[in-house]
């Protein structure tokens, strides 16, 4: 037993060490996949011996049940804010005040830090273990967001020290933020899923921390830099520099741009260097923070009611300027999303000439009441596309023109469709020239027709050379077409032709998924396949009412589908594919009706088959698998370490099966 404890403990230490090297030292020793492997190993061991799970285990970061609401936490020392210095003069007078306050006698060393544009939080550790964490709130009381903070991988769940017990209390303050690249990635995913994008990384970080379900937070790319102390019992520091270096040793990420400066001139140099560097940093900052280094001097200087006298925030020049909207146009994205874009009188914003700003969608134009001819305040933040903050109403002339998105797609003039409840209008035309590349990439992707060797580069070449204009053109390609392309070897050309050929023998559900009908994903394609017995003509001719009757197809999807087929050219593309040899077999043929009308929930860690296999098996025997247990559930199949769903099943008297029993049932 003690052997087991020490194996699990040393694996945990190993993972924590790698975490520390990655997030704090920025010097990883192993690849992500090696890390994942260690992590899975620990998960497995802990599942076999749940009694060995500790509160600071890296497996314990995501909570199991969503909260109903956040509680509150009182900060033991108020979280003050910072006074602002808007320019060099104000920084100079701050420094003079310091000199006066310290009687001009002592040398003043200052710690200079970036002012991060995120959310201030407090993390509380008792005897070296994370106890809870909160937002800044009004400075006195914040919201208890412990569960969400724990999901941030760079926040240590326990301190990296052997003397944990000696540090009875440690309150650490820092800023939670999203990197610019994490933000771009998140918005890309949201757009692809038809969700509204976040306006900027700060909003995205705030929205992520405010989730009641920490599973959602855990999927958001959040980071933290720690920069101040609240209460500490069991350790004392003479200076901020000492404190920051202890923070680093204990495993907290500290901003690498932090620097000691020794006089006002060095402060100003730091400020302007950081401002020049601003756009190249991977996260957003909106200024510098200067803090007196020595704690003794901080105590002498003291605080006003809202901000300490020993610190100041130096603001950067505004990245906001005004300009005029000369026109508004509609642009069609790769997935058919139609986005209004404002054309601007060119202006310099923080060193970059801006001529366009995104208006996101029609609702946004109405909400901000933006018209052609308006004078507007625009802002640029890092790599984010410039956007309009607001209209300067006082400057509106009488001849401004309101704008409404066109009813026809500006690229192909087919009808535009805005599904109910969605903010984005879309063009559903398979032949729309603005979407060719996006459509083809989806058509050939793994879960769709899965055509091997057909990468993004080849798609670009073929589309740019006008060799492909719609997805059916793929099946018209021959060896000669490909081998004539730049840098295409004969062998690769033949491999691609072979892959295209074998992709023709596909299933109804893959093909329907490949068409990229809005909201018709992999799963729904299978549902539709079953509903129409894999008959594509029946699907094409289905009425709204017939579609709506299908279990899992709601009115919005039914309308999307009928609108898709209303466009004759979409049917032409499908018919052309079939004429070129595409064969649609039934992929999810029923093996049996053993689970007919049965609703099954899989929970815990499955060891005999994967979740996807479990779902496929259930469907192929006529059943349906869902995510939550209710009185309508017929069976709960419980894998290892099943938790709340298993408990609920027992409480509701739902039959519980092991994986083996499930397999027997469908045998
Ligand atoms: S020190 C009394 N350091 O700015 C000291 N704050 O306007 C207050 N912030 O609420 C905190 N970067 O959320 C400090 N390097 C940094 C900071 C920073 C960003 C935020 C923090 C605070 C706000 C004050």
Image (spheres, helix red, strand yellow):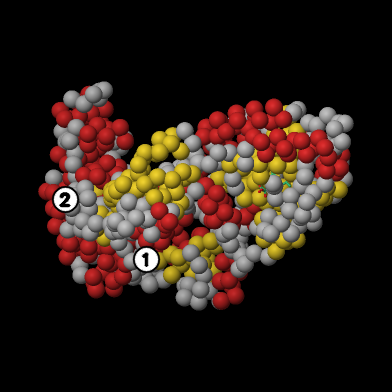
Between circles 2 and 1, the one closer to the viewer is: 1
Residue at 17 percent of width and 36 percent of height: 466
Disc 1 is placed on an element classified as loop
State the residue in front, 239 or 396: 396
Residue at 27 percent of width and 41 percent of height: 437
Above or below: residue 345 compared with residue 72 = above
Task: Tell me if 339 is positioned left or right of 485 in this view.
Answer: right
Residue 31 in the image: state x and y as whole percent. Answer: 56, 33
Residue 532 in the image: state x and y as whole percent. Answer: 23, 65
Task: Tell me if 49 is positioned left or right of 378 in this view.
Answer: right
Residue 350 in the image: state x and y as whole percent. Answer: 49, 36
Disc 2 is placed on an element classified as helix
Residue at 36 percent of width and 70 percent of height: 596
**Which circle's residue, 2 or 1, is located before the other in the chain?**
1
The residue at which mark 2 appears reads as 573
Q: Which quadrant is home to the C terminus? A: bottom left
Q: Quadrant of residue 496?
A: top left
State the residue in front, 382 or 143: 382
Q: CA distance from mark 2 to mark 1?
A: 29 Å
The residue at which mark 1 appears reads as 421
Task: Tell me if 156 is positioned left or right of 667 in this view.
Answer: right
Residue at 63 percent of width and 44 percent of height: 224
Above or below: residue 202 compared with residue 255 = below
Please tell me how crowded label 1 is: few (under 14), some (14-19), or many (20+) other residues with Cα within 10 Å: few
């Amino acid at each position: 037993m003690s052997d087991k404890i020490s194996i699990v403990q040393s694996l945990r230490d190993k993972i924590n060490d790698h975490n520390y090297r990655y997030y704090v030292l920025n010097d990883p020793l192993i690849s992500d996949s090696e890390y994942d492997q260690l992590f899975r190993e620990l998960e497995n061991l802990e599942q076999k011996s749940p009694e060995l799970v500790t509160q600071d285990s890296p497996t314990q970061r995501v909570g199991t049940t969503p909260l109903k609401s956040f509680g509150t936490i009182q900060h033991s020392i108020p979280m003050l804010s910072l006074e602002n210095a808007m320019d060099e003069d104000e920084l100079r007078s701050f420094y003079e005040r310091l000199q006066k306050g310290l009687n001009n006698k002592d040398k003043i060393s200052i710690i200079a830090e970036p002012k991060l544009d995120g959310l201030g939080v407090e993390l509380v550790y008792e005897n070296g273990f994370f106890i809870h964490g909160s937002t800044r709130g009004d400075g006195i009381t914040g919201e208890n967001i412990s569960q969400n903070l724990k999901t941030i991988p760079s926040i240590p769940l326990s301190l990296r020290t052997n003397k944990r017990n000696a540090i009875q209390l440690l309150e650490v303050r820092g800023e939670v933020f999203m990197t610019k690249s994490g933000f771009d990635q998140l918005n890309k995913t949201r757009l692809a899923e038809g969700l509204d994008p976040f306006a900027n990384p700060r909003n995205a970080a705030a929205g992520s921390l405010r989730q009641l379900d920490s599973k959602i937070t855990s999927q958001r790319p959040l980071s933290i830099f720690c920069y101040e102390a609240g209460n500490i019992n069991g350790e004392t520091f003479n200076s901020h520099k000492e404190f920051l270096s202890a923070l680093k040793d204990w495993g907290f990420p500290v901003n690498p741009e932090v620097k000691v400066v020794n006089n006002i001139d060095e402060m100003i140099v730091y400020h302007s260097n950081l401002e020049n560097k601003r756009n190249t940093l991977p996260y957003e900052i909106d200024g510098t923070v200067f803090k007196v280094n020595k704690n003794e001097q901080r105590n002498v200087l003291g605080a006003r009611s809202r901000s300490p006298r020993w610190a100041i925030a130096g603001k950067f020049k505004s990245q906001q300027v005004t300009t005029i909207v000369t026109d508004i146009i509609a642009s069609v994205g790769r997935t058919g999303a139609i986005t209004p874009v404002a054309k601007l009188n060119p202006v310099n914003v923080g060193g970059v000439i801006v001529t366009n700003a995104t208006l996101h969608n029609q609702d946004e134009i109405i909400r901000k009441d933006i018209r052609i001819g308006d004078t507007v305040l625009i802002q640029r933040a890092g790599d984010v596309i410039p956007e309009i903050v607001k209209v300067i109403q006082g400057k509106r002339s009488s001849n401004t023109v309101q704008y409404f998105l066109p009813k026809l797609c500006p690229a192909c003039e087919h009808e535009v469709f805005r599904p109910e409840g969605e903010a984005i209008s879309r063009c559903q035309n398979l032949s729309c020239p603005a979407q060719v590349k996006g459509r083809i990439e989806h058509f050939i992707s793994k879960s769709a027709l899965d055509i091997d060797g057909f990468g993004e580069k080849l798609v670009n070449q073929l589309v740019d050379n006008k060799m492909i204009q719609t997805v059916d053109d793929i099946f018209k390609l021959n060896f000669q077409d490909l081998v004539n392309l730049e840098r295409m070897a004969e062998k690769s050309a033949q491999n691609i032709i072979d892959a295209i050929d074998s992709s023709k023998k596909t299933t109804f559900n893959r093909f329907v998924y490949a068409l990229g009908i809005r909201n018709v994903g992999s799963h729904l394609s299978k549902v539709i396949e079953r509903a129409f017995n894999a008959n594509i003509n029946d699907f094409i001719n289905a009425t709204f009412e017939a579609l709506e009757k299908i279990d899992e197809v709601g009115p919005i999807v039914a309308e999307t589908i009928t609108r898709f087929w209303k466009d004759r050219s979409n049917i032409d593309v499908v018919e052309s594919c079939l004429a070129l040899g595409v064969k649609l077999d039934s992929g999810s043929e029923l093996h049996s009706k053993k689970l007919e009308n049965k609703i099954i929930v899989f929970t815990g860690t499955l060891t005999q088959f994967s979740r996807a296999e479990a779902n496929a098996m259930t469907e192929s025997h006529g059943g349906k698998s869902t995510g939550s247990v209710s009185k309508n559930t017929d069976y709960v199949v419980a894998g290892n370490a099943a938790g709340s769903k298993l408990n609920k099943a027992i409480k509701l008297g739902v039959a519980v099966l092991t994986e083996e029993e499930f397999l027997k049932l469908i045998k």
